[in-house]
Structures are given as C-alpha cells and as structure tokens.
Image (cartoon, rainbow, N blue to C red):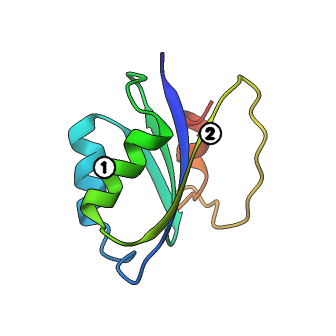
Amino acid sequence: MRKRFVIAINSNRYLESDDLIAYFKNKGYAWWSWIDGFWLIVDPFGSETPNSLRVALSDLRPNIRMFVMEVTGDEELWAGFGPTGSENDMFDWVRKNWK
C-alpha cells in the first residue's frame, strides 16, 4: 500500500539536493520539491515510516533539523501559489501523484 510523506529540512545545504534525489530515485519514490527544503514524497511500496525516513535522511544530512510526517486518508485537500503554465506547472506533479 502506497504511503505519502511531507518532509521539511532546515539546512544550509538544501540547495544541494542531488543526494536526496538520488536516495528517492534509488528507492523508486516519486517526489516534489518546488519549495526550498520542503518535499512531498510518495512511497509506492508502503515500506517507509516517518522514523525510517528521518533516520535515512539524517545519514545523508547529519545534524540538520527536519520534520517528517505521513499523510494518511483518501481526502485530498491542498492549496498553493506558483507558476501554472503549460511548460512550467508547479502543481502538475501534485495533481498527478499526490492523490
């Protein structure tokens, strides 16, 4: 069963996201991060927990502040503001993957 997570990371290295992206790719997860230090993650296998993600990300980014929350339930309520053009739609991924 797939799981959804919200991750907030407070780090001076947040612009260096290659290690996070590589981790999510290697796990087969979908991700969204149009806001610095803020990630939406979809684990299609349902293998993660907030704690297991926190531990894995702490290994990548030692001594940083972070918050990991699992989003449960079928209801999809969200709102945002950003580019929505056909070539640069900030929320296209959210509409397609977050449900």
39 w.r.t. 9: above or below: above
N-terminal of the pair, mark 1 or mark 2, is 1
Question: Residue 40's spot in the image, x, y percent?
Answer: 52, 49
Q: Secondary structure at mark 2?
A: helix
Q: Quadrant of residue 84?
A: bottom right
Question: Residue 19's spot in the image, x, y percent?
Answer: 23, 62
The number of callouts visible is: 2
**Residue linked to disc 2:** 95
Rate crowding at label 1 as few (under 14), some (14 to 19) or many (20 or more) other CA atoms within 10 Å. few
> Nearest the camera: 59 or 89?
59
In the drawing, does residue 14 fall left or right of residue 50?
A: left
**Residue linked to disc 1:** 56
Q: Residue at x 54, y 35 (%)?
A: 4
> Nearest the camera: 64 or 94?
64
Question: Residue 7's spot in the image, x, y percent?
Answer: 52, 54
12 w.r.t. 52: above or below: below
State the separation of the CA atoms marked 1 and 2: 27 Å
Q: Residue at x 51, y 28 (%)?
A: 3
Q: Amino acid at mark 2?
A: Arg
Q: Amino acid at mark 1?
A: Ala
Question: Residue 11's spot in the image, x, y percent?
Answer: 43, 77
> Nearest the camera: 16 or 55?
55
11 w.r.t. 79: above or below: below
Q: Residue at x 48, y 22 (%)?
A: 2
In the drawing, does residue 66 fall left or right of residue 83?
A: left
82 w.r.t. 79: above or below: below
Q: Secondary structure at mark 1?
A: helix
> Nearest the camera: 51 or 44?
51
Q: Quadrant of residue 48?
A: top left
Q: Residue furthest top?
A: 1
Q: Quadrant of the C terminus?
A: top right
